[in-house]
Amino acid sequence: MTIRVIIVDDQAMVRAGFAALLSAQSDIDVAGEAPDGRRGVELSRSVHPDVVLMDVRMPEMDGLAAAREVLNPPAGVIHRPRVLMLTTFDVDDYVYEALRAGASGFLLKDAPPADLIAAVRIVAAGEALLAPSVTRRLIADFAQQRPAARNGPALRLRGLTPRETEVLELIARGLSNQEIAGRLVVAEQTVKTHIGRVLAKLGLRDRAQAVIFAYESGLVTPGDATA
């Protein structure tokens, strides 16, 4: 299946470079480009991409505001693409807020070409793109700076089984499915099943939102993450 992608970035050279790289892949189609967030939202609603590569800082409308509009369309708009945030820095306030808004992850602009291609495929497949070492620090930093009201999320945790709660905690600590399987001594497919149930019960979109929820519910606190 061909993955339709649009690139939203205010730097023409960045857009051109990403477009050339992605278009060279047999399973990826670059359906359009936009120089700012506002036109990125309009383009997304007109061409219905599977993945939106969204720069964080742009004129007219920044990437965070644009991501919110793409991920939370007005009534009558059914299509909801995945959003992959592009950033120059590995710790960025906007990236954290974008994850909270429903973005499926983030990628550094200077990442190797192979990482960009893999990221598009991972996000298009419905997975979240979370680099554990960077994401643990990012989430912990901003969760500590912005303590959320925990009563609501904490109550929602009660709907999980002990094993599901344990899996959610390990996700938030930055462990991969393979690492979680090793820690719990279960098959990796079993871990995937648990994660699917956790997302369904908590009404979460993907792994990225599960990490955010774990911190905001108090299940995991800044400083808990494993090395």
Image (spheres, rainbow, N blue to C red):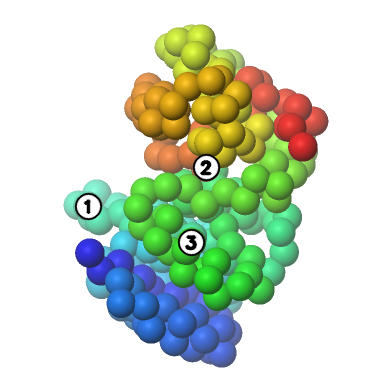
**Figure quadrant of the N terminus:** bottom left
Q: Residue at x 31, y 54 (%)?
A: 80
Identify whether 27 is placed above or below 218: below
Q: CA distance from mark 2 to mark 3?
A: 14 Å
Task: Sort mark 3 into few (<14), some (14-19) or many (20+) by Cα contacts within 10 Å.
Answer: many
Figure quadrant of the C terminus: top right
In this picture, residue 55 sits left or right of residue 76: right
- SS class of the residue under badge 1? loop
| Residue 24 visible | yes
Amino acid on which disc 1 is placed: Ile
Q: Earlier in the sequence, mark 3 or mark 1?
A: 1
Query: Which mark sits nearer the N-terminus, 1 or 2?
Result: 1
Where does residue 51 sit, x and y in percent of width and height?
A: 37, 63
How far apart marks 1 and 2 lie (CA) works out to 22 Å
Quarter-of-image position of residue 22: bottom left
- Point out residue 221 in the picture as x, y percentages from the top left corner: 72, 26
Residue 209 in the image, given as x and y percentages of width and height: 50, 38
Q: Amino acid at mark 3?
A: Ala
Asked if the residue under mark 1 is in contact with the one under mark 3, i.e. CB atoms within 8 Å, the reply is: no
Q: Residue at x 37, y 48 (%)?
A: 126
Q: Which residue is mark 2?
A: 208
Up the image or down, 13 lies above or below 73; here it is: below
**Residue annotated with mark 1:** 78
- Residue 130 percent coordinates (x, y): 57, 49
- Whether pointer 2 and pointer 3 mark residues with C-beta atoms closer than 8 Å, the reply is no
Looking at the rendering, which quadrant does residue 216 occupy?
top right
Q: Nearer the viewer, residue 1 or 206?
A: 1
Calculate the distance from the C-alpha at mark 3 to the C-alpha at mark 1.
24 Å
> Does residue 202 appear to the left or right of 184 in the view shown?
left
Q: Which residue is mark 3?
A: 119
